[in-house]
Every structure is written in C-alpha cells, then in structure tokens.
Amino acid sequence: MTGTNGRAVVAKRVDDGHPDTEEIRDLAASAGYTVAGEVTQARAEDPALCLGEGKVAELAAVVAEVDATALVFDNRLGPYQTFNLGTELPDGVEVIDRFRLILDIFGQRARTKKAQLQVELAELRYELPRAEAKASLAKRDERPGFMGLGEYEESREEDITAQISRITDELERIEQTEQHRREQHRESGFDLVALAGYTNAGKSTLLRRLAADVDVDENDDLHPDLDATAESEDRLFTTLGTTTRRADIDPRDVLLTDTVGFISELPHWLVESFKSTLSEVYRADLVLLVVDVSDPIEEIREKLVTCHDTLYERNEAPIVTVLNKIDAVDDAELDRKREALSALAPDPVAISATEGAGVDALRSRIDRELPDWRHERLVVPMTDDTMSFVSWVHDHAAVEAVDYGDEVTIDFEARPAVVEQARARASDLAAAPAE
C-alpha cells in the first residue's frame, strides 16, 4: 500500500562506517511515504551533490525503477546540493533533506496555535540561509533568473526576517501566558513534572500509566483544540504539542506533562524554534528523562548526551533517568547497561511502562525528588468562613489532623507557596470582626 505522500527512496552518506537508515525510514513513514528503496555511501561529502557522481547516477536509476515521487536524504543538504540533485533525477521528483522532512512531519501534527507558530518559525529559519545564498549568488553573478527565482530573493530574505521577528514576539506572549498558568498551578498546590526523551522511548505510555482518573483540561483561548489524551502509538512525533494530566503520586498533587520527543542530530535552530514547547520541561519542578533500555548501549549513550545538552542548557530542575522497556531485556543485559551508563544516568529507575513493573518505585522516587513540603499548624477562630478555609486546605495540602472547638486547629503539609497562602487566609479570618 502506498503512503499518503507516495513512494520515496531514502539516501544517506557517512564519512566512514556503515550508514544506518532505520531512523530516516521511520521518519519517512511518519511523514506518509512508502519507502521503496535506498542508496547509501561511505565517503567524504561531495560539495556539489553530497554523494559521489557515480552514486548519484545509481540513485537516479533506483528512483526511476521504483517510480518514486520523492528522494529523502538523511543528510542536511545545502540549497545548491538540493538543486543539483534535482537536475539529476526524473522530472517531478522532490528532493527532501532530513530537516525538511522533520518540518513536514511537524506541520502535519501541529494542531494548536502554538504548535503551528513553532512549525512556521522553524520553516522560516530553515529557509532563511537558502534565500540568503540564492540572493548572494544572483547579485554576485548578475543572474537574476538563477534557479528561476529572480530578483525576488532579496526581498524574500527581508520578508523572512520580518516574519521570524513577528512569530517570535507572538510565541513570547504565549509563553508569558503559559508561565502565568504554571504559577497558578503551583499556587494551587500542584508539583509540575515533565517527561523528556527521544521519540518512541515510551513517554506517552508512561504518562497513561502514571495518570490518575482525573484529566487536566489545559485548554484556553490559545489552545482551543489541545488533545487531552496522549497517544502511545509506535511512531515518531505522535506528541507534538504538550499533553498534561494529573498524576497519581500520593500524597502529592502532580501535573505530568508529555512533550515532543527528541531526535538525533537536531540542529540548534530547530531546537530554538520549539523553545516554547520545551519550556514545559525547562520550567518543571522535576524532569523524567525516559530512555528505551532495549536500544544498543552506544545508541543510548548518544541519546543521553543529546538530551543532556538540550536540557542542562536551561533546565534547573533535577533530572531522573527512567530506563523504560525492561520487559524487552533480561536482568543480565539490564545490569550491564546500568553499569555502562552510570556516568550519564546515575541511580536510574528501571520500569516497564507497558506492563507496570517498577512504576511504584518510580512514584516513590518522584515524591522524594520533588521540592520538600513544609509542615504547618494554624489556629483560626470559628467563624462562618472557617469551614470554607478548612476545605481549601484539604484541596491544596496533605492534612494530617483537624481539631474543632472554640477554635479550629489544622495540621498539614504543603508546598511553601500554599503554606504562605494558608497563613494569609488564616490571618484574614483572625482579623475579621466578630458577628
């Protein structure tokens, strides 16, 4: 069966060694292509074609043989390489590099206003150096018709820059709104936990495993179509926007957020374009870094390094590594990988999100790693508003005891912000005139 985007041939070049095409095949499938063939090469990059001329001729033959509509490169192609490759292929075959493909997938999955803006921003940042290069060449060689783009390129470059500025400002306004929402959650007694990690590591499955029965509806005017449930399909980029649910971490009230998964070799401009979504990770109280422990050790190590580079740049919260999918490895392999990864993942928690093994231990670890609660005892007069105050404390804290008499004494533990609010409310009750 042909994918919705038609048939594709994948290509990959590496400097040496064996080119691994598994991820680019998965990415192409996620974008809706049926992968009908592949061509790989181990050699230094050709500045004009990426691959060597002979290999490009082989590539063109494969594309024609399978009647492909697209050539998908697992390398980053410059604008001239893309153009030159296109001239070597049958008419109508689109040349797509790794990052153009990722942007296409993001565009297909962007259902919220914020996600759509971030995709547009990433596309513009991808296009800007290409517009700059085309404008520079046309100006230098006095060839306004170069590549059929003409004098349009200089004004296009200016237009892209203006659009980037506009979208960045709009995303900053959205981020301010979401930061306000996060602070409201904290003031209401919630701890904020974020899931991070690579695609297909099992983040969405873990979210469903940890979630309580009560869903959290984060829809607001900026997110009218946010899906309240996280899918757990075995495909890349299932979660592009953020999905937040209330987690079952007794005695705490925890909001757990799943965000877009990382992929290997993400360029800085692409990560920067999705900074607004990643702020759910950067601004959390705790980050669970989910790893597929069934992957080869070297692959896990590379993924952990990439995640750490992205997270530690801005993140201040503690990070707990979660070794997921222990149902897919035996005890000896798990122990070997724990030891090999100990420098990057000290004291990890091993679980199977699918089967539930180790999840109770993870809940306990989450409770230990989150900011300490403070114990408080408040004594308030018995007034018409006292029971409303006691109910509020029950909703926002872990109440240990309530003693009723001429006065009400309440012992509880809560986040520091909640303790301060409770003190202020108790003070207002004490200051209220007696009726």
Image (cartoon, grey):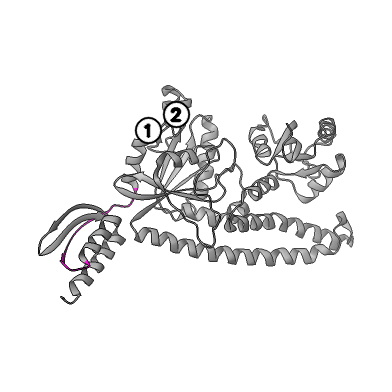
Q: Which residue is mark 2?
A: 326
Residue type, label 1: Gly
Kindly indicate whether the residue at mark 1 contacts the one at mark 2 (C-beta within 8 angstroms): yes
Q: Is residue 121 magenta?
A: no
Q: Earlier in the sequence, mark 2 or mark 1?
A: 2
Q: Residue 18: where, in percent of width, then height?
A: 67, 29
Crowding at label 2, few (<14), some or many (≥20) Cα neighbours within 10 Å?
many
Q: Residue at x 35, y 40 (%)?
A: 363
Q: Indicate left or right for 366 with 48 as reference.
A: left
Q: Bounds of the magenta span?
A: 370-385
Q: CA distance from mark 2 to mark 1?
A: 9 Å
Q: Residue 134: where, in percent of width, then height?
A: 80, 57
Q: Quadrant of the N terminus?
A: top right
The quarter of the picture where residue 189 lies is: bottom left
Crowding at label 1, few (<14), some or many (≥20) Cα neighbours within 10 Å?
some
The quarter of the picture where residue 28 lies is: top right
Residue type, label 2: Ile
Give SS at disc 1: loop
Vertical relation: 20 (above or below) 4: above
Q: Indicate left or right for 129 with 363 as reference.
A: right
Q: Quadrant of the C terminus?
A: bottom left
Q: Residue 413: where, in percent of width, then height?
A: 24, 54
Q: Indicate left or right for 392 with 430 as reference.
A: right
Q: Residue at x 43, y 52 (%)?
A: 216
Q: Which residue is mark 1?
A: 358
Vertical relation: 318 (above or below) 380: above
Q: Nearer the viewer, residue 25 or 210?
A: 210
Q: Residue 384: where, in percent of width, then height?
A: 20, 68
Residue 41 visible? no
